[in-house]
Amino acid sequence: MSTLTITNLHVAVKDKEILKGVDLVLHEGETLALLGPNGHGKSTLLAAIMGNPNYTVTAGTIALDDKDVLAMSVDQRSKAGLFLAMQYPSEIPGVNSADFLKAAMNAHREKPLSLFEFYNKLQKSYKEMGIPFEMSNRNLNEGFSGGEKKRNEILQLKLLDPKFALLDEIDSGLDVDAMQVVASAIKEEQQKGRGFLVVSHYARLYDMIQPTRVAVMINGKIAVTGGPEIIKKIDTTGYEWIKTELGIEVQKDEQPMNKVSIGVCATREAVAPSKK
Amino acid sequence: MDITLVDNDIKDLTFDVKEGDTLNLNLAAFKGFPNSNIVVKVSANGHFKGAFADFSKGEGKFVLNVILEGDGSSCDWHLSSLAANQDKKVFDTSVTHLAKHTSAEMSNYGITMGESHLTFTGVSSITKGAIKTVTRQAAKIIVFDPLCDGRCSPVLKIDENDVDASHAAIVGRLNEDHLFYLQSRGISLPVAKRLITLGYLKPIESYFADQKLVAKIDGSIEEGI
């Protein structure tokens, strides 16, 4: 059984420290729900585990069993068994979905899949995720609705067979039916023994996928860990109890507006001659 | 009317598109850069559809001037260019709207590698009286290597009020988020770059009717990246 171990992880984005010493252990077969107010570092943790270059690890370690994840390139992390379902999957113009999936699946194998095997697997997964197979011929995520993008993320999870799946707000943008499909797919993958680290703000998804443990991220650290009862507590009372029970001041999510400048670039030729 | 010109056949030429006619012009260059000046005059309700797949080597300037002379005439232009090694290529693609209800789409896409220079310029002019005109000019260059140089300067000259005009210019490296997304699925950096670049250049093939030429363009894209 594999274990993902995060120790004293500090992560900065553009010199601003977001994670301030995260300690977390996740075993294969577990589903860990990661909750916390907006802007406290949940997505940052997931992105840092996967190696997003916008996030700089300034201290700490991430280990997958005895392997140093931080020493691996992004594609090596995927091949080692990590998968990140993104909150905002990129739309990539010109890259055909089927070509992309084939390249991704073959990257995880020593011998490339035969065309027959590939199409069989593809058709099966599209059907299971309720995505029309014709969409495999479209550009990757381009013009997909929010729900289609999220289903497409889970479809990739099924096809790439990771040890640990990190789900970043996989339920945002999903309608009730799509939520059912996504939750069923996650449950099926749980039964295969994968480990899940799931970020969501809503108890509804957690009700469906039944996490085994819960961690709450406050101010860039794991403030509380415990059982699923914490989800209900947060769902009904919010995060106020963190301050009253644990004495931790919950910092407000401050996102100052970026500096913007708007210019005019069309030139209008003078129409009327100036009067003298 | 369908016209296909390859390599040395691309030279200084003038085309007159008669009233109600359509000119489909396919250009493809694989050898030396085709220094040339092409003028297309389009009469009322005539249409010019042009596509240029440029995988040539060398330096020079290619000029396209489309003049929409008649009411309801249109222009639809697509260019994909690959500049590599010491190439120095300039594409100047302009359209002039002289009449009412005319429309134009000018799309120039390029990749610059090695120590090459690639420049897209062009002016979309809307003259007085050319009301209800729609014109779009887009130029995009992906810069691959530290020593190459990409420049885009699409210009709009607007002399009429009742029009819809826009331009866009993008020069930059491959999108980091796109690369991260592909790599996070186990795809190595060189393969991720290749997939994105293929996706960037290949759409030009859809404008070509001659399948043998499409296969040759396909080969040049593969070879180029």
Image (cartoon, coloured by chain):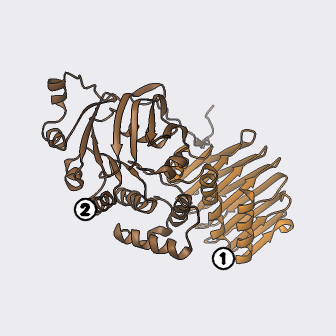
Chain colours: A brown, B orange
Whether residue B128 is visible to the viewer of this picture, yes or no, is: no
Mark 2 Cα shell of 10 Å, populated few (<14), some (14-19), many (≥20):
some
Mark 1 — residue?
B21
Chain letter belonging to callout 1? B
The residue under the point 63% across, 76% down is B20
Q: What secondary structure is found at the residue carrying circle 2?
A: helix
What's under tag 2, amino acid-wise?
Gln
Q: Quadrant of residue A114?
A: bottom right
* Residue A96: mark: none
Is residue A183 or residue B152 the one in the foreground? A183
> Quick check: B211 above or below A51?
below
The residue under the point 40% across, 42% down is A4
The residue under the point 41% across, 60% down is A144
Expressed as whole percent of the image width and height from the top left, the position of residue A15 reads 48, 25
**Nearer the viewer's eye, disc 1 or disc 2?**
2
Chain letter belonging to callout 2? A
Is residue A27 or residue A227 the one in the foreground? A27
Q: How many marks?
A: 2
Q: CA distance from mark 1 to mark 2?
A: 54 Å
> Quick check: B77 above or below A233?
below
Expressed as whole percent of the image width and height from the top left, the position of residue B132 reads 52, 59
Mark 2 — residue?
A180
